[in-house]
Image (tube, rainbow, N blue to C red):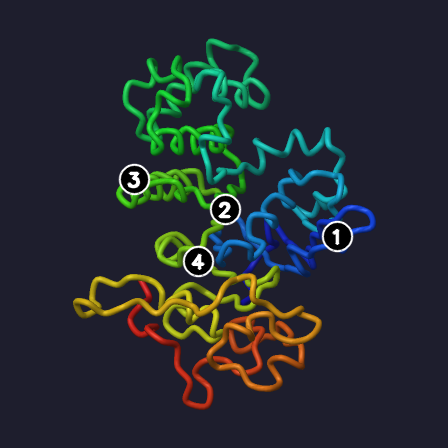
Amino acid sequence: MSRAGEPLLSVRNLSVQFGLKRQAATTAVDEVSFDIHPGEHVGLVGESGSGKSVTSLAVMGLLPRRGVKVSGEVLYRGQNLLTTPDSAMAKIRGREIAMVFQDPMTSLNPVVTIGVQLTEVLLRHETSSRKEARRRAGELLERVGIPDPARRLGEYPHQLSGGMRQRVLIAIALACGPRLLIADEPTTALDVTIQAQVLEVLKELVADTDAALLMITHDLGVVAGLCDQVNVMYSGRIVEASARDQLFATPRHPYTGGLLASIPRLDSPRGERLVPIPGSPTQTLPWSQGCAFAPRCPHRQDDCTTVPPHLEATGDRLLRCHHPLGVDGVTAPGSEGVAQ
């Protein structure tokens, strides 16, 4: 799984705990490690509550200070962002590393025009001329496919459709040509048709700017069209990491197989039912006791609930599982032919 050259971003043993004094701490991210190389597109996949968004917020330095404990290292071009002063992070955030948030209605200021919000980042990092910043803002709106950009600059977020608001967030994130773009569920609040349009815009712009991409999503269909490497998270830990084609062709962790089996497919027989993952993401074991996925795993055995699994290299992938799919005649349900 090694790639040539130094990584642009190297996350090492990142852990995030939430909890106030005299309260038991909750671990949302538990010793997560992964690399992103220049120009590489990496997926971070898992159900809600798996720790994906908390990981991205920790990388960006956007977690609150009170009641939060962050440990490990987040190395961006060799600089540990977790120990970087706020003043220095303010220069990196937006210019070097940018983020597209999942809900544009809460990410955009409802009482400030689109033009002001888009020119703000340009004035801070790129130019001191408001006239030049506004011209650039119009070009960015046109680039993300928003018609009549001059008029849209004077409008407020509520006057735009959901798809347009998401495109505005993409324009803001890519305004300064960041080296790394983090997209946190950028199509969650959109209908299927608009999702496809927004993802296509994102894909084209990332390719044009040669930016590295960290795509955070629960949808492996999104990963199939965007990412080179995939990290699958469950209950705060990475359970499988592999190249995209390999992961889709032969998923090894039962959780990965379950995610793939729950994807609707056009080549499925009419009336065939999807195969959901049983149970709820809240049904977990502590990682210190055994496999957190064991209560929901149809392939669990006795050691799954008594022996903690470690993330180990298996061929060209990383895997955290005592009894992986493809071993002892166990195959992933619905995994055949899923690779894109």
Residue where numbered disc 4 is placed: 228
Number of numbered discs overlaid on the protein picture: 4
Density class for disc 2 (Cα within 10 Å; few <14, some 14-19, many ≥20) is many
Q: Is residue 13 above or below residue 188?
A: below
Q: Residue at x 50, y 75 (%)?
A: 297
Direction left: furthest residue: 270
Q: In this rendering, which labeled residue sits more in front, label 2 or label 1?
A: 1
Label 2, label 4: how far apart the Cα atoms are: 11 Å
Q: Which residue is mark 1?
A: 71
Residue picked out by circle 2 = 212
What amino acid type should be assigned to the residue bearing mark 2? Ala
Instruction: Identify the image quadrant of residue 256.
Output: bottom left
Closest to the camera, between mark 4 and mark 3, is 3
Question: Which residue of the protein is positioned furthest toward the bottom in this rendering?
Answer: 328
Q: Position of residue 38 (x, y in %)?
A: 53, 49
Q: Mark 1 belongs to which amino acid?
A: Ser
Q: Nearer the viewer, residue 144 or 110?
A: 110
Left or right: 219, with 123 as reference point: left
Q: Nearer the viewer, residue 311 or 271?
A: 271
**In the image, residue 72 above or below residue 211:** below
Q: Residue 250, position in %: x, y?
A: 40, 75
| N-terminal label among 3 and 2 | 3
